[in-house]
Image: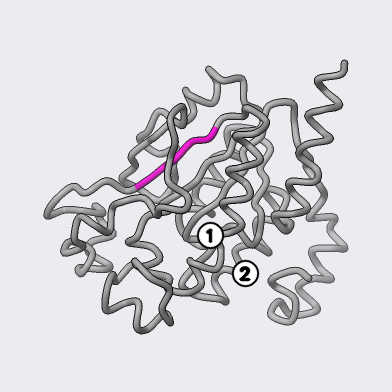
Amino acid sequence: MKPWQGLVPELDEQLYNAAGFGQTSGIGRKPALVVIDTQYRTVGEFPKPRLEALCEYPTSCGELGWGAIPQIVKLLECFRDLGLPVIYAYVAPKGRRDGGRFSDKLPAITGIPLKGYEFIQEVAPREGDILIPKNHPSAFFGTPLASYLVDLGVDTVFLAGCTTSGCIRATVVDAFSFNYRVVVPQDAVFDRSTISHAISLFDIAAKYGDVLPTQEAIAKLSPQLAGHQNH
């Protein structure tokens, strides 16, 4: 089931389908996994309902974030087992102007304690992973991410983390603009808003990348690489 089923008006889906949007981009020869903002500030230190979670961190997605963690674990295991690049784009504490203009929209972001910037233990980086601090929604903007991808020979970007309507979507659009194939495992990304999550995935699937469940993405990933390695 697609996350946007029952939310996108039927006529809208008919229009996109009639125009031919939503074709499959597929997976190239060298994928990389980019994990975005998997820090306690985005899920809280323990699973809680979203409104309760806001009392701990104003940027928390609560139980919706924790619900995606097992899928991110599976992706990390797969990429590491296959010896493929794993890159973490994350928010580093910057003091009073933490978040740049975002602190104008959400002033409480400036008071997040340092614990919130730690990586969630279950999906924390390991030796050999690449860490890239970022100041803006897109993991590409003002960072060396594109340079790393070129150096590694990457042609496909898998994305996991949050938020679907914010940093994930912004990074998807930039990856697409750099001519990378894009894959978004729909249950390995999350958002504080269920409607924003669903509609963002609909838009991504129509225009910028492939959106599918994590298990399907992993199933497509391994044979694809095995086939290339045999040539």
Q: How crowded is mark 2: few (under 14 residues within 10 Å), some or many (20 or more)?
A: some
Q: Residue at x 65, y 33 (%)?
A: 81
Q: Residue at x 38, y 62 (%)?
A: 42
- Specify the quadrant that holds the N terminus: bottom right
Name the foreground residue: 147 vs 47.
47
Name the foreground residue: 41 vs 138.
41
**Residue ID for mark 1:** 69
Q: Where is residue 109 in the image (x, y as percent from the top left)?
A: 23, 64
**Residue ID for mark 2:** 199
Q: Which residue is drawn at 27% across and 67% down?
A: 105
Helix, strand, or loop for circle 2?
helix
Q: Which residue is drawn at 69% across and 48% down?
A: 209
Q: Does the magenta stretch include residue 177?
A: no
Q: Where is residue 220 in the image (x, y as percent from the top left)?
A: 80, 43
Q: What residue type is labelled 1?
A: Ile
Helix, strand, or loop for circle 1?
helix
Q: Where is residue 35 in the image (x, y as percent from the top left)?
A: 50, 45
Name the foreground residue: 136 vs 216.
216
Q: Quadrant of residue 88?
A: top left
Q: Position of residue 193 (x, y in %)?
A: 50, 75
Q: How was this image coloured?
A: one colour
Q: Nearest to the eye among marks 2 and 1: give it.
A: 1
Answer whether residue 206 is visible to the viewer in this image: no
Q: Is the magenta stretch mostly helix, strand or loop?
A: strand
Q: In which quarter of the image is residue 59?
A: bottom left
Q: Residue 171 carries which label?
A: none
- Specify the quadrant that holds the C terminus: top right
Number of marks in picture: 2
- Is 189 placed above or below 56 here? above
Q: What stretch is highlighted in magenta?
A: 86-90
Q: Which amino acid does label 2 sit on?
A: Ile
Give the spatial CA distance, label 2 vs label 1: 21 Å
